[in-house]
Image (cartoon, rainbow, N blue to C red):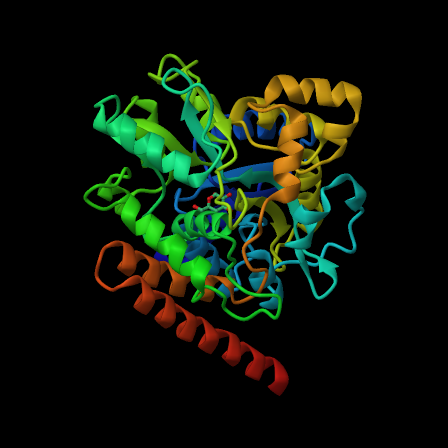
Amino acid sequence: MVKFVLPICLLTAVACTSDPRGKTIVFPVSSVGAEADVLRAQIARFEEERPDIRVVLRETPDSADQRHQLYVQWLAAGAGDPDVLQLDVIWTPEFASAGWILPLGAFEIDETVFFPGTLRANRWRGELYAIPWFVDVGMLYWRTDKLDAPPATLEELEQRAVAAKRRGEVEHGLVWQGARYEGLVCVFLEHLGAFGGRILDEKGRPAVDTEPGRQALEFLRRSIGEDGFVPRAVLTWQEEQTRFAFQSGRALFLRNWPYAYPLLQDPEESEVAGKFAVAPFPGTANGAPTAALGGSQLAINARSRHPEAAFALIEYLISPERMLERARAAGQLPPRRDLYDDPSLAAELAEALPIPPDEARRVVEAAVPRPVTPVYTELSSVLQVWLHRALSGEVGTDEALREATDAMTDVLDRTTARRDAS
Ligand code: GLC
């Protein structure tokens, strides 16, 4: 008797996992701020429109690096699920070159509706592999009840932050993401740009061991020093910890992405609702105000068993209406330029966004991408380690920049050697 029980159970288990409603697609997503609620509502409507497709959402960690690790584990194992992938803007070349995501040439996509800069990072060897979903740009949040205008230069930011702290008006002058993870590289890139520098030069070689690199890292180090204006605790902080510090009224300035805006504006949660505005993170006379380009893209797992269903979901999520909803609920900037160009859509966008669409458009078009290369994650890990060591005072800034340059050069040389050999 017992012999027959096992196969019957197995059969039942198989029958239970295949959905009677049709295809099931798995979609892991980030849920920082209000993102998760708006997405859940959109998915529910999508499932009503497409009763043949069931979408299973899987929550992923807030940290960009932990999310990356998780995706690499899934994809390197050759799993067919997840089907739809939410990629950080810096991952597309890596995942495309590894053969983990589908080239999208076979699907009908009108590329002309997107800002060209947002598509650039999603191409690999001339083919499009992911579609921009929302754009993130680094911004300076400032307290309108304490200042008449945002600082025009980085020096002015420093002076105002120090003065407000000395007067005891705030506990912290500025808060940014300083933990050893991707966010720190974004903060560094913005300071680097402020002093006129960049991570790689036009030839694709490391460019941080330079005068602007030194000035930027020195500035960051001084900011968290004894007489500084950034709390040392930022060395363990990611986006949400910095938002909480600003939201509780403890900081004059905050560097963060657009998602924080609607949350800070919520009087139930935030002490600074109605008392802040956003501006570009300022530059110095030698550089320019620089916003890091971030954001999420949607791609399809090359091993998905349901690529058409996966694309149907992507198509739904990138429609103008869905992007407007996301802008309204989560403050995220849409990568579609028709939303900024078409007068009726632009009027809706103006209502939804924290900054006027013209200004949002300028910021998006001028935002500075991180290096677009399949070895970006390796380059970033090197930078994260050495920047963090310099900021925690374990090594000097010169040594950190020299070591980071050597290690990045090794990564790039190894890649060139691999490419030449193949
Ligand atoms: C945001 C950005 C992403 C960036 C990350 C760093 O999620 O969209 O591009 O890598 O922050 O923390």
The residue shown at (37%, 53%) is: 181
Q: How many labels does the image show?
A: 0
Q: In which quarter of the image is residue 237?
A: top left
In the image, farthest residue toward the left? 226
Q: Is residue 25 visible?
A: yes
Q: Where is residue 272 in the image (x, y as percent from the top left)?
A: 37, 17
The residue shown at (28%, 48%) is: 222
Is the residue 216 above or below the residue 260 in the image?
Answer: below
* Quadrant in which the C terminus is drawn: bottom right
Viewer-closest of 378 and 162: 162
Q: In which quarter of the image is residue 7?
A: bottom left
The residue shown at (46%, 51%) is: 8
Q: Is residue 5 visible?
A: no
In the image, farthest residue toward the front? 285
* Quadrant in which the N terminus is drawn: bottom left
Q: Position of residue 369 (x, y in %)?
A: 58, 52
Viewer-closest of 74 and 359: 359
Q: Quadrant of residue 313?
A: top right
The residue shown at (52%, 58%) is: 198
Q: Position of residue 252 (x, y in %)?
A: 34, 27
Instruction: Judge left or right: residue 170 versus residue 270.
Output: left
Instruction: Judge left or right: residue 5 versus residue 281.
Output: left
Is the residue 321 above or below the residue 176 in the image?
Answer: above
Instruction: Judge left or right: residue 74 versus residue 344.
Output: left
Is the residue 282 above or below the residue 269 in the image?
Answer: below
